[in-house]
Amino acid sequence: MAKRQGKTLRFLEKFFTLEDTPHKIAAGAAVGLFMGILPIESISSSLIITTIARFNRAAALISVAASNVWIMVAVLPLAALSGGTLFGTSPGELSNQFYQTYRCGWGYFFTKTSFYKLTLPLLVGYIIVGGIISLAFYFFLYAILKNKSQLFLK
């Protein structure tokens, strides 16, 4: 157990000592988290966005890796709530439709019928929820990075 905690502390220390400005590290991590929450291919998307915006790519990759597919499933109820509210659909119905059609494969989500009733409301919901979570994460991480000298006193 102590060995595992040591590895975790070294990982966190490396993350918080990335050579970049606090803004660029926090922004890169927030982009990675946002892309990790969305139900799309997130690694290359976050690399492209962070490269264009000149944010820290390492921070983006770390946060994409930390926010795996399970976070997408955990955020589904909130995405269904926000997307369903905007599109006038019951959040419970959206979640049920997602779980029922998930077995049909990703191609089904882009059929004309399914796209407007299911995919678009859920995607908009994921963007809203992911944006809120990522923005909050940015400010949280930025505050920590601004005061990082106090974190790793030796």
Image (tube, helix red, strand yellow):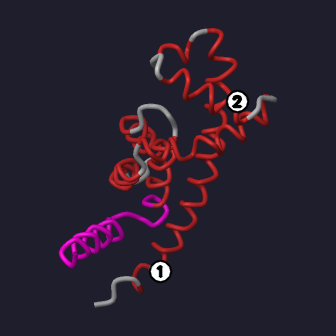
**Residue to which mark 1 is pinned:** 147
Residue 69 in picture, x, y percent from top left: 42, 41
Image quadrant occupied by the C terminus:
bottom left
Q: Nearer the viewer, residue 87 or 131?
A: 87
Residue occupying the point 65% across, 23% down: 118
**Residue to which mark 2 is pinned:** 93
Residue 2 in picture, x, y percent from top left: 21, 79
Q: Which of 101 and 130 is in front in this view?
A: 101
Residue occupying the point 43% across, 51% down: 55
SS at mark 2?
helix
Query: Range of the magenta residues?
Result: 1-25
Question: Where on the picture, by quarter, is residue 114?
Answer: top right
Residue 40 in picture, x, y percent from top left: 47, 31
Report how far apart the C-alphas of labels 2 and 1 lie in the structure.
45 Å
Q: Earlier in the sequence, mark 2 or mark 1?
A: 2
Q: Which of 27 and 106 is in front in this view?
A: 106
Label disc, if present, on residue 130 of the rendered structure:
none
Residue 8 lies left or right of residue 107; in this view the side is left
Question: Where on the picture, by quarter, is residue 3?
Answer: bottom left
Label total for image: 2
- Does the segment drawn in magenta span residue 27? no
Residue occupying the point 42% across, 50% down: 67
Q: Which amino acid does label 1 sit on?
A: Asn
Task: Check whether the beta carbons of the residues at disc 2 and disc 1 lie within 8 A of each other.
Answer: no
